[in-house]
Image (cartoon, rainbow, N blue to C red):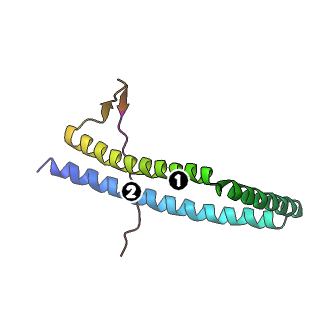
Amino acid sequence: MDNQQPNAATLLNIENLIKSHDIKLNTLSDELKVQKEMLNDVLENDTAFQEASKEAKKFAKQKTVAKAQVIARPEVKTIVEKIKDIQSQTKELKVALSDYLAQYVTISGINQIEGEDGILRQIVMSAHLVKKAE
């Protein structure tokens, strides 16, 4: 029973830290939005910036059109498809590796693993809060 009291207190402390940090992150996020809006307002009212922005948009459109023309070529379409396939495989492998690493840490209690190359690597877990879907 003595062991559960400190664990409960520790868990309560951690829960309070999570909540306070979550509140602080939300506050900072709101403040960031306000500051970005202020900056955007200043930029929208600056004529030199507006002129430069118009020129940049014109060149960006030209670049987009040129890129689309190049990508439309059959030999380039093949390359684009290979890139998408490799990206998809990479994403799937990363998700699976993350799951395997979590299982490894849970089962072994060790947060390090030696790679095929003989280099010892540390396993770093990452967690974040998301609103629960209702």
The x and y percentages for residue 52 are 85, 58
The residue depicted at 16 percent of the width and 51 percent of the height is: 4
Q: Is residue 123 above or below residue 75?
A: above
Residues 49 and 15: in front is: 49
Q: Quadrant of the C terminus?
A: bottom left
46 sits left or right of 124 in the view: right
Q: Look at the image and give the residue range highlighted in magenta.
A: 122-127
Give me the disc on residue 18. Answer: 2
| Residue 103 picture location, percent across and down | 25, 45
106 part of magenta stretch = no
Whether residue 126 appears in magenta in the rendering, the answer is yes
Q: Are marks 2 and 1 in contact (CB under 8 Å)?
A: no
Q: Tag 2: Cα neighbours inside 10 Å, few (<14), some, or many (≥20)?
A: few
Q: Residue furthest bottom?
A: 134
Say above or below: 103 vs 58. above
Q: Secondary structure at mark 2?
A: helix
Label disc, if present, on residue 81 of the rendered structure: 1
